Image (cartoon, rainbow, N blue to C red):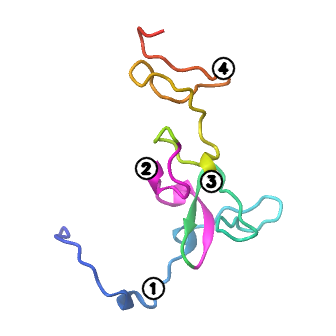
């Protein structure tokens, strides 16, 4: 039978429930130290590798393989929000890891972002 509605319940009904990092799967480990990567805000904080995401709660912050977790629905759901292109998740504060914007024509190009090492606009067919 399908669920008909979702209702808020008191938080104390969740007492005793435990949220496990990476939904119980293994977290990403540092190949040199063998320690799980910490993507929180502490002194040992590290960025998660590209094929992983940061699973963060008030109790832990671990890098988890994407296969074991939920993919981001949009860049707005990412830890650092969206890049200026409004599509790419930023890899750090201040739009770290974002593609360069060249000010490409919004109508005549596929994106405002530069493409490749040439850092040129990728024009749509018939536009040059």
- Closer to the chain start, of discs 1 and 4, is 1
Q: Which residue is mark 2?
A: 74
Specify whether 98 is left or right of 78.
right
Chain part drawn in magenta: 59-83
- Neighbour class for label 2 at 10 Å: few (<14), some, many (≥20)? few
CA–CA distance in space, label 1 to label 4: 52 Å
CA–CA distance in space, label 1 to label 3: 33 Å
- Helix or strand or loop: what does disc 2 sit on? loop
CA–CA distance in space, label 3 to label 2: 17 Å
| Residue 88 image position (x, y, % from top left) | 51, 42
| Residue 69 image position (x, y, % from top left) | 50, 60
Q: Count numbered badges in the picture.
A: 4
Asked if 31 appears above or below 1 in the picture, the reply is above
Q: Which residue is mark 1?
A: 17
**Residue 93: assigned label:** 3
Specify whether 123 is left or right of 116.
left
């Amino acid at each position: 039978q399908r669920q008909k509605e979702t209702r808020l319940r008191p938080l104390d009904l969740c007492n005793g429930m435990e949220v496990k990092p990476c939904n119980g799967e293994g977290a990403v480990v540092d190949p040199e130290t063998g320690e799980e990567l910490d993507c929180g805000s502490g002194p040992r904080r590290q960025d998660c590798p590209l094929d992983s995401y940061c699973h963060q709660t008030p109790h832990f912050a671990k890098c988890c393989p994407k296969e074991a977790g939920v993919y981001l629905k949009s860049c707005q759901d990412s830890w650092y929000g969206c890049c200026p292109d409004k599509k790419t998740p930023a890899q750090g504060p201040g739009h770290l890891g974002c593609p360069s914007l060249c000010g490409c024509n919004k109508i005549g190009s596929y994106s405002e972002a530069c493409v490749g090492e040439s850092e040129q606009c990728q024009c749509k067919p018939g536009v040059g």
